[in-house]
Amino acid sequence: MTTAVDKASPLRKPQLVSADQPALKKQRTVSDVNQVDQLKQLTTVVADTGDVNAIKKFSPQDATTNPSLIYKAAVMPEYASIVDDAVTYGKGDLSLTMDKLAVAFGTEISKIVPGYVSTEVDARLSFDTEGTIKKARDLIKMYEEVGVSKDRILIKIAATWEGVQAAKQLEKEGITCNLTLIFSIAQAIACAEVGCTLISPFVGRIMDWYKKANGVDGFAPTEDPGVMSVTAIYNYYKKYGYKTIVMGASFRNKEEILELAGCDRLTISPALLQELTNASSNVEQKLNATKAVNMDIPKIDMSESTFRWMMNEDPMATEKLAEGIRGFAADIVKLEDIVKAKISAKFD
């Protein structure tokens, strides 16, 4: 049964937490196992970083990077040789050097994690379907040149309508994709219907928007709008049998992570992984695929016009998607400036 778009909102009205409200009580039950190891029994834990040494520390299944994380890693002294090698490879070609740098970090990460490594397409191609497809093919070719099979790589693409269409073609070619910057059920459904391997719905950035919009300091974990959004996407996917992996991302605190225990995957920063490692309260499963199948969730027929209308009606999703693309693009430019200086020093 298909419902009208205006009935499809995944969010209930959030419970606001004022500055003077007492903190929520912590779980009293304590386990002998830290929360990271408990979480790994319920969901696949992914490291959200370009720092190879941090990935080694936490032994995740997969790892995700983005331009912001690659920039942070590229300016660290211990990774200077990776940058220098990419500059040598590029022979003065900035675009080629940038692609090689992303692949070089991904290659190093692939030696540590047994599963997927996500490598992001230039965010400035977010509204260019053909440009995204070409860039993805180029990145996969570079990986294969150094012996990394394409089945180890997820090409990370912003979940614009144009990005979703690029992923549709790439998946047909056997190039697996991670659609990122997902803030809306419309984006999630569009990705699932074209057969994307994985999506990254954001949690913390949604909370940020609602905190500012409502003038509050925070939300109770169970009423966090970002948690509620990812939960709705997960339940929708399981209800209708979509195979696309749901990987919650962009966390502001460990409570958000724990409220999504049971999600297919969760990509977590090293700082929050450390917090979870230091904690031992029991971790309970919150998301359950079997229960989702029996939920009363209306089906939405997705099309380009429906996608664009639903995004138009969701100011949070529209604003955060645009902001995210701009942010990644800005970090690409900052990284390019570093690379340009090294190219000039080597080839001029």
Image (cartoon, rainbow, N blue to C red):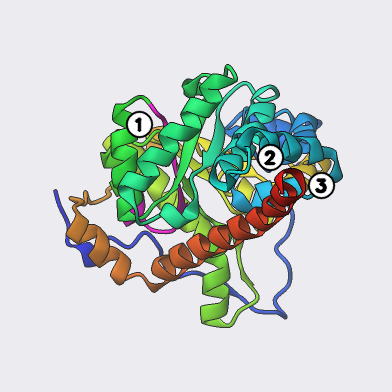
Q: Tell me the residue at 51%/65% (across/down).
A: 326
Q: Quadrant of residue 8?
A: bottom left
What residue would you read off at disc 2? 87
Label 3 CA crowd tier, 10 Å (few <14, some 14–19, many 20+):
few
Q: Tell me the residue at 62%/43% (across/down).
A: 92
Q: Tell me the residue at 45%/66% (across/down).
A: 322
Q: Is residue 89 visible?
A: yes
CA distance separating discs 1 and 2: 39 Å
Q: Position of residue 245 (x, y in %)?
A: 43, 35
| Secondary element at image label 1 | loop
Tell me if residue 91 is in the magenta stretch.
no
Q: Is residue 224 visible?
A: no
Residue 243's disc is 1
Q: Position of residue 306 (x, y in %)?
A: 20, 59
Q: Hey, what amino acid is under mark 2?
A: Val
CA distance separating discs 3 and 2: 16 Å
Comparing marks 1 and 3, which lies closer to the viewer? 3
What residue would you read off at disc 3? 76
Comparing 77 with 4, the one in front is 77
Mark 3 or mark 2, earlier in chain: 3
| Secondary element at image label 3 | loop
